[in-house]
């Protein structure tokens, strides 16, 4: 019989995989299974960039047959190729279809697709387009690629402040953006732009997870945020929790736990980014509940006493 931890655990709701990521992973696994059956296990599915910003989940999928590459040229002609939830620009998709034909599986998240369509719409109607987001993020790069005309990317409100006055401007955001950033940007731009058109392209699942973190930080002694260190939406959860003066530990998996962080904490909150699979969250909960953390804490205290 396993010993239970005395700590109380509360998991934020909702947390973990969002609809778009879950849909993409299911699509990818189906593609891998079909490809393996068709070619008796000797054919792989290729993805331009990591299909999900979670290294552990990518490792699991790699064992099943996923191959992550950086360039279109790294995909063998006629191979099965997967377009991740972040999407790609029209130019990249056209190049993949030309190279692989019907072997292309497009798993672009519907919320990302909406942002891409809004960028194309604004650009087509003659608006310069401002995208609020990280210029290095693949989702933002794909959105920029959908805007055919003048386009800007602002990763902070300070960069929004630096924009020159314009007659017209269309604004959209990365789907993982915080709603307060979009609102603040609108206030900055309203006096400066004669015709300002804004589409709220923030994903509803992102907003729900951010609100869940705000709620849980009110009544826990500390918050474990589990998710890939390259995940934009996970980083936003950490940022929100810290802004509320909550003691936060950002980890990718249970193995990353620091036993010292648990000292004097009775109620632990757990939140996860939209690209964190359930199996990682469950492993973390199990590590705490089976007193693995408590035993590690005892060892740590013992070393200190010596």
Image: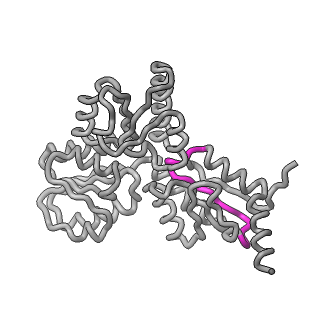
Front residue of 224/28: it is 28
Q: Residue at x 28, y 66 (%)?
A: 187
> Where 117 sits versus 195, above or below?
above
Residue 249 at least partly seen = yes
Q: Residue at x 75, y 68 (%)?
A: 297
Front residue of 94/10: it is 94
Q: Is residue 269 left or right of residue 136?
A: right
Q: Magenta residues?
A: 263-278
> Where 273 sits versus 6, above or below?
above
Q: Quick one: which residue is furthest to the top in this view?
A: 38
Q: Is residue 273 magenta?
A: yes
In which quarter of the view is residue 152 placed? Answer: bottom left
Residue 110 at least partly seen = no
Q: Residue at x 64, y 67 (%)?
A: 222
Q: Is residue 76 left or right of residue 234?
A: left
Rendered location of residue 76, percent (x, y): 32, 32
Q: Quadrant of the C terminus?
A: bottom right
Number of labelled discs?
0
Rendered location of residue 20, percent (x, y): 45, 40
Q: Is residue 158 magenta?
A: no
Q: Quick one: which residue is furthest to the bottom in this view?
A: 306
In which quarter of the view is residue 83 placed? Answer: top left
Rendered location of residue 212, percent (x, y): 55, 55
Rendered location of residue 174, percent (x, y): 34, 52
């Amino acid at each position: 019989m396993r010993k239970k931890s005395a700590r109380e655990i509360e998991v934020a709701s909702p947390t973990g995989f969002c609809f778009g990521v879950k849909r993409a992973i299911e699509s990818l696994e189906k593609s891998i299974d079909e490809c393996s059956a068709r070619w008796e296990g000797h054919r792989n599915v290729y993805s331009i960039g990591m299909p999900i910003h979670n290294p552990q989940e990518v490792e699991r999928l790699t064992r099943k047959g996923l191959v992550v590459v950086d360039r279109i040229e790294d995909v063998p002609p006629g191979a099965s190729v997967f377009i991740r939830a972040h999407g790609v620009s029209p130019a990249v998709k056209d190049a993949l279809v030309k190279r692989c034909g019907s072997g292309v599986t497009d798993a672009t998240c519907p919320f990302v697709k909406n942002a891409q369509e809004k960028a194309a719409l604004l650009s087509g109607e003659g608006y310069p387009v401002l995208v609020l987001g990280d210029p290095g993020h693949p989702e933002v790069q794909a959105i920029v690629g959908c805007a055919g005309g003048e386009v800007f990317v602002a990763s902070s409100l300070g960069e929004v402040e630096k924009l020159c006055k314009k007659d017209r401007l269309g604004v959209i955001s990365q789907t993982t953006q915080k709603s307060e950033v979009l609102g603040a940007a609108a206030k900055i731009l309203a006096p400066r732009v004669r015709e300002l058109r804004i589409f709220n392209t923030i994903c509803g699942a992102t907003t729900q997870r951010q609100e869940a973190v705000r709620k849980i930080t009110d009544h826990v002694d500390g918050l474990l945020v589990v998710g890939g260190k390259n995940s934009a939406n996970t980083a936003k959860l950490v940022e929100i929790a810290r802004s509320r003066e909550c003691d936060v530990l950002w980890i990718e998996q249970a193995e990353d736990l620091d036993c010292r962080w648990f000292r004097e904490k009775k109620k632990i909150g757990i939140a996860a980014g939209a690209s964190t699979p359930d199996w990682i969250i469950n492993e973390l909960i199990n590590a705490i509940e089976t007193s693995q953390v408590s035993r590690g804490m005892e060892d740590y205290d013992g070393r200190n006493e010596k």
